[in-house]
Image (spheres, rainbow, N blue to C red):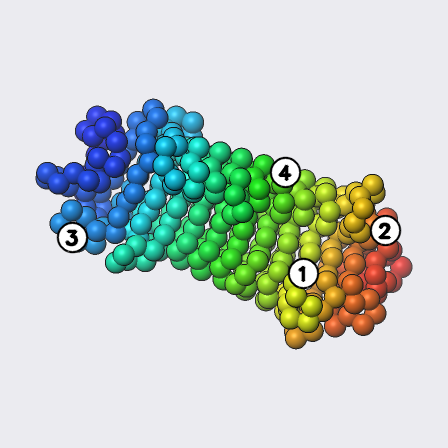
Amino acid sequence: MTIFIVPDDFPTVQAVIDNVVPPILVSGDSIEVRAGTFPSFVLPDEDQNGDPLERVRIAGCGIGKTIFFGGASDGVVIDGSPQTYLKDFTVQNYSGSGVLLQIGPNLSGDNCVIQDIEATFNGIGFDIQTNDNTLVNNFATFNVEVGGGFAIMGEDNCLFENSSNENRRGYYVTGTNNQLVDNIGKQNAQDGFLLITGGSNTLVGNLAQKNNIGINCQTDNNLIKENRSCNNINHGIILVGDVGSEPNGNRVDGNIARGNGSPLGVLIDSGIFVIDGAGTVNPNAITFNKLKLNEDFSILDEAGLATPNIYNGNVCTDNPSSPPEACDPGIN
């Protein structure tokens, strides 16, 4: 295994990748980047010998110390190289994605690890188009495109203890079977967490705070469990979609929705909102949630008494629910 030092051995990361004079970068090698400001790079899925390029480690000196700064549409691009490990740097000021994992010409680019990285002032902070990746303790701020801080298009990705604040959206999930555990989505202009296509994702233990909408679920068969959705401008948690088609089969269990909605707003707000038609194919189960200080409703199901959805054990205080049976009798 060879360790390349930037800028001691080569002036940039891309210079290490493009070098054709032995030793060249091969599978299992590391690139260590000292403190300073550097341009973008693309890690391909083949080395200069045409062999598969896997298990490359690229590490900086820390957030705010090693900085990859704008000048190209995307910042750090992993173009199909699987099992890449990225750690300890900032990616800033790219019009496209700060960190982009995409399928390469020859390899899938799956099973990467992204840890302790900041993506700020980009179009999208972290753009994950491949599968089975792990993102731990990363930070996304001031990313302005639809995908916001974390755009998750792939499958079976795990996001753990990340923070996405003051982006257009916090987490924009269009893939399936992804797990988001103990993450923060705070003060994002639109949604803290948006599940918009795909389905069968898991959100457990996350915090959605001071967004427009806390958790926005527009797909089927998701588990939304033990999250906190607090002080969002409109709804805390919503199940929405085309009437009569989606969302269906979601389990919303053991969450806390507190202080959502505005008494001065022109829209009807709630702690948990379920659109008319949701659950028609397969009922959603909204159970054992705790709701307090939400305007205008604790729980609002547009279907009212005709709802096909299942309600049990919800504890609601301060504001009514519709239908009343959405909360345990005597709790409202």
User: According to the image, label 2 marks what residue?
Assistant: 319
Of callouts 4 and 1, which one flags the residue occurring earlier in the amino acid sequence? Answer: 4
Kindly identify the amino acid type of the residue bearing the numbered disc 1. Val
Of callouts 4 and 3, which one flags the residue occurring earlier in the amino acid sequence? Answer: 3
Kindly identify the amino acid type of the residue bearing the numbered disc 2. Asn
Q: Which of 111 and 143 is in front in this view?
A: 143
| Outermost residue toward the right in this view | 330
Work out how far the residue at label 2 is from the one at label 1, CA to CA, in angstroms. Answer: 21 Å
The residue positioned 42% from the left and 36% from the top of the image is: 94
| Outermost residue toward the left in this view | 22
User: According to the image, label 4 marks what residue?
Assistant: 187
Work out how far the residue at label 4 is from the one at label 1, CA to CA, in angstroms. Answer: 21 Å
Q: Nearer the viewer, residue 29 or 108?
A: 108
The residue positioned 38% from the left and 49% from the top of the image is: 101
User: According to the image, label 1 marks what residue?
Assistant: 240
Q: Where is residue 247 in the image (x, y as percent from the top left)?
A: 64, 66
Given contact means CB atoms under 8 Å apart, are the residues at marks 4 and 1 in contact?
no
Assign a secondary structure to mark 2. loop
The residue positioned 21% from the left and 26% from the top of the image is: 8
Work out how far the residue at label 3 is from the one at label 1, CA to CA, in angstroms. Answer: 48 Å
